[in-house]
Amino acid sequence: MYGSIRHQIRIARSADDVWALAGDPTKLHTWFPGIVDCTVDGTTRVITTGAGLPMPEQILQCDATQRRFQYRITAPIFRDHRGTIDVIELGPDECLVVYSTDCDPRTMALVIGGGSAGALAELKRQMEQEQH
């Protein structure tokens, strides 16, 4: 049985500006707490946690037109996983960022969901602070 978690946050910044950071697979560690590094080689991304644990991922989609980034953690602790980040334009200087996680085992959705909520808060802080 899959676990599914979704968090969203409004950011007072243009969708294009937010997408430039949130949609860049090489910059995840700059706004996702607990991730200290990431490297990308083709469609493979390896994130490194604060504990030094490397987690391999497969990039499924990086669509600048839809502003959608999807990935799948391929580490053996997951039977299946899909993470999706959508940046939705609400106006010229406001957007909604939705981060959803679906995974098996379902308990891991709670772990990742907690992290993604913190990541959205940090993304908002960085994007809104830059404007002032």
Image (cartoon, grey):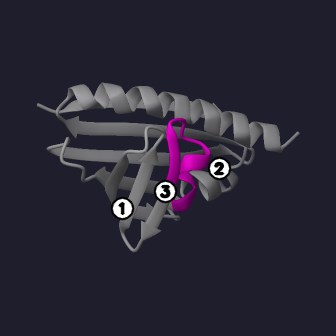
Mark 2 and mark 3: Cα distance apart in space:
19 Å
Sooner in the amino-acid sequence: mark 2 or mark 3? 2
Q: Do the residues labelled 2 and 3 touch (CB within 8 Å)?
A: no
Horizontal placement of 72 versus 113: left or right?
Answer: left
Find residue 40 and report its image quarter.
bottom left
Foreground pick, 130 / 32: 32
Q: Which residue is drawn at 24% across and 53% down?
A: 74
Mark in the foreground, 2 or 3: 3
Mark 1 and mark 2: Cα distance apart in space:
19 Å
Find residue 10 and report its image quarter.
top right
Mark 2 lies on a secondary structure that is helix
Q: How crowded is mark 1: few (under 14 residues within 10 Å), some or many (20 or more)?
A: many
Image spot of residue 77 (x, y percent):
20, 41
In the rendered image, the vertical position of residue 17 relative to residue 90, given as above or below: below
Q: Are marks 1 and 2 in contact (CB under 8 Å)?
A: no
In the rendered image, the vertical position of residue 20 relative to residue 77, given as above or below: below
Q: Residue 59 carries which label?
A: 1
Q: Residue 118 carries which label?
A: none
Tag 1: residue type? Answer: Ile
Q: Residues within 10 Å of mark 3 (few under 14, many from 20)?
A: some
Q: What stretch is highlighted in magenta?
A: 26-37
Mark 3 lies on a secondary structure that is strand
Horizontal placement of 20 versus 53: left or right?
Answer: right
Q: Which residue is drawn at 58% across and 55% down?
A: 27
Find residue 45 and report its image quarter.
bottom left
Mark 1 and mark 3: Cα distance apart in space:
13 Å
Tag 2: residue type? Answer: Val
| Residue at which label 3 appears | 38
